[in-house]
Image (cartoon, rainbow, N blue to C red):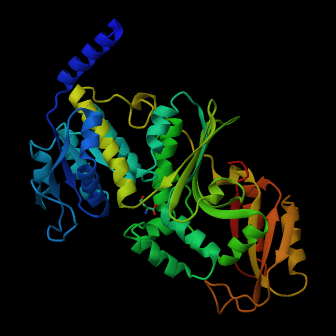
């Protein structure tokens, strides 16, 4: 053995001694779909985790209000009751996993754990988007870590990638399909044949959807996630309440068909970009159905899968793809966080990286660019009476607002608007693709057009993103 190998082995031995081989105890609060996945992964891959850490991670205690349902997990040697506070206070529990969701009880439990010096792993994007500032501050003050990889993109290690793998970069943009339920619904609708409600029900049965479907369908879940991504990408404050958010309720099969006809697909995207102009340094943050080129990689993401495209000034374009929901993919991220925190606990090095990548004292409020200042092409679906002269009236208003039309087509005859089948009977949809224009100009044209007597339902705008 050469001298350098000998000394490496000696370092390895002394490190192993320092790290110790005694197990670390994990307490799991919330034994639902993801909690069951976490217990399964910890059991199934125990040998691998021990080999990677140098000591075992042991699930020692679980708390859930439902203590009777059989989850198909071997609970031998694990205390299982409904007392989450007792779990946190249990000296055998050194790492706490919060998987109950919601923002009230979860916030209290996480703060209790952090105040007792116990690191926390959570998948709770809503809680962090709303109360992250307080939670990260308490963690920092106490010198305790909180990890939340599973909160965005399920099993995709996107947060760790942004925080560490891309730490050298000035991030320019993030475009994410970050809600599996809506992607599933849109892609199933694209294939045709199933109603919105039937597809949504299937997504719920498959375990993708939030308890309240409006959290998914109205874009709120994606807004929670893009809030975290924007903070991480740009060192911005968490700004969930200011994130313009539109869901997919108004997207019709006709929009999806028109998109395909013109070389696009519709996806619900979370988008965040940095912008530097005469008004200073600001960020775009938004969630809305978006038409994207059919040949782009994001357009090929089907079903409940998630994908996040990140553009960095040094690395260029990158794409992260994987399962954004479901028991085992989400458990993969939760257990990865446990492994990282366990290593830190053993080495006594909490706070190795700032949770939101930028150190809290360097986080600055970054104003959000108002939607009116966006500039790009739009898809417009007008619902109008089927009579001569209507198209020229619409084109006239667009023209007076400086909006140039790239293409226009009338789809069928006598279409009834799904949200107003009686009132709009006899109406037809006219779809228009515009040349690039400011959204303020488009909005003001639409305000005028929607006042025209021939227009029978509010016009629908879908933004087009060309550069992904
Ligand atoms: N409800 C979420 C989704 C999964 O549909 O993607 C958890 O974030």
Asked whether 346 or 228 is in front, the reply is 346
Question: What's the residue at 86%, 80% (across, down)?
Answer: 390
Residue furthest front as drawn: 1
Would residue 269 be seen by someone viewing this image from the given angle?
yes
Spot occupied by residue 259 in the image (x, y as percentages of width and height): 73, 67
Image position of 311 with respect to 153: above or below: above
Instruction: Judge left or right: residue 102 versus residue 309.
Output: left
Q: Nearer the viewer, residue 166 or 435?
A: 166
Image-based side of 442 in relation to 82, left or right: right
Give me the residue at 73% from left, 87% from top: 415
Q: Quadrant of residue 427?
A: bottom right
Q: Could you say where residue 248 lies in the image, as x and y percent from the top left?
A: 57, 69
Using residue 164 as the reference point, say whether residue 257 is left or right of it: right
Location of residue 150 in the rendering, given as x and y in whole percent from the top left corner: 38, 50
How many badges with numbers are in the image?
0
Residue occupying the point 24% across, 45% down: 46
Q: Quadrant of residue 265?
A: bottom right
Between residue 406 and residue 452, name the one nearer to us. 406
Position of residue 246 relative to residue 121, above or below, is below
- Quadrant for ligand 1? bottom left
Q: Quadrant of the N terminus?
A: top left
Horizontal and vertical percent position of residue 64: 18, 62
456 shown above or below 57: below
Relative horizontal placement of residue 38, taking residue 84 as reference (left or right): right
Q: Is residue 145 visible?
A: no
Q: Image quadrant of residue 459?
A: bottom right
Q: What residue do we see at 14% from left, 59% from top?
A: 75
């Amino acid at each position: 053995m050469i001298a350098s190998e000998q000394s490496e082995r000696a370092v390895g031995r002394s490190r192993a001694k320092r790290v110790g081989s005694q197990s670390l105890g994990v307490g799991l609060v919330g034994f639902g779909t993801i909690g069951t996945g976490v217990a399964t992964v910890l059991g199934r891959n125990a040998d691998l985790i021990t080999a990677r850490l140098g000591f075992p991670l042991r699930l020692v205690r679980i708390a859930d209000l439902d203590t009777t349902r059989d989850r198909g997990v071997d609970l031998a040697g694990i205390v299982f009751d409904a007392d989450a506070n007792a779990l946190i206070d249990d000296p055998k529990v050194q790492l706490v996993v919060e998987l109950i969701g919601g923002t009230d009880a979860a916030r209290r439990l996480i703060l209790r754990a952090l105040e007792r010096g116990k690191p926390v792993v959570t998948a709770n994007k809503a809680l962090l988007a709303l109360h992250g500032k307080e939670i990260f501050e308490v963690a920092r003050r106490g010198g305790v870590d909180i990890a939340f990889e599973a909160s965005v993109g399920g099993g995709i290690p996107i947060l760790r990638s942004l925080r560490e793998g891309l730490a050298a970069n000035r991030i320019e943009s993030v475009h994410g399909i970050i809600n599996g339920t809506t992607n599933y619904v849109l892609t199933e609708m694209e294939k045709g044949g199933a109603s919105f409600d039937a597809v949504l029900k299937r997504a719920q049965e498959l375990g993708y959807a939030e308890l309240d479907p409006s959290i998914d369908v109205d874009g709120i879940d994606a807004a929670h996630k893009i809030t975290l991504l924007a903070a991480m990408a740009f060192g911005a404050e968490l700004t969930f309440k200011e994130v313009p958010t539109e869901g997919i309720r108004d997207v019709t099969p006709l929009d999806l068909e028109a998109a395909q006809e013109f070389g696009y697909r519709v996806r619900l995207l979370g988008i965040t970009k940095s912008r530097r102009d005469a008004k200073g340094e600001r960020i775009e943050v938004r969630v809305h159905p978006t038409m994207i080129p059919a040949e782009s990689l994001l357009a090929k993401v089907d079903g409940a899968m998630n994908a996040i495209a990140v553009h960095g000034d040094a690395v260029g374009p990158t794409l992260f793809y994987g399962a954004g929901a479901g028991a085992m993919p989400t458990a993969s991220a939760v257990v990865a966080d446990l492994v990282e925190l366990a290593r830190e606990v053993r080495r006594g090095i909490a706070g190795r990286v700032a949770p939101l990548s930028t150190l809290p004292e360097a986080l600055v409020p970054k104003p959000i660019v108002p939607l009116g200042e966006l500039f790009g092409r739009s898809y417009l679906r007008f619902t109008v009476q089927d009579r001569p002269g209507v198209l020229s009236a619409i084109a006239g208003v667009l023209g007076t607002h400086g909006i140039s039309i790239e293409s226009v087509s009338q789809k069928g005859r006598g279409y009834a608007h799904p949200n107003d089948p009686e009132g709009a009977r006899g109406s037809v949809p006219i779809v228009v693709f515009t040349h690039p224009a400011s959204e303020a100009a488009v909005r003001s044209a639409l305000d005028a057009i929607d006042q025209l007597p021939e227009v029978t339902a509010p016009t629908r705008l879908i933004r087009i993103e060309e550069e992904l």
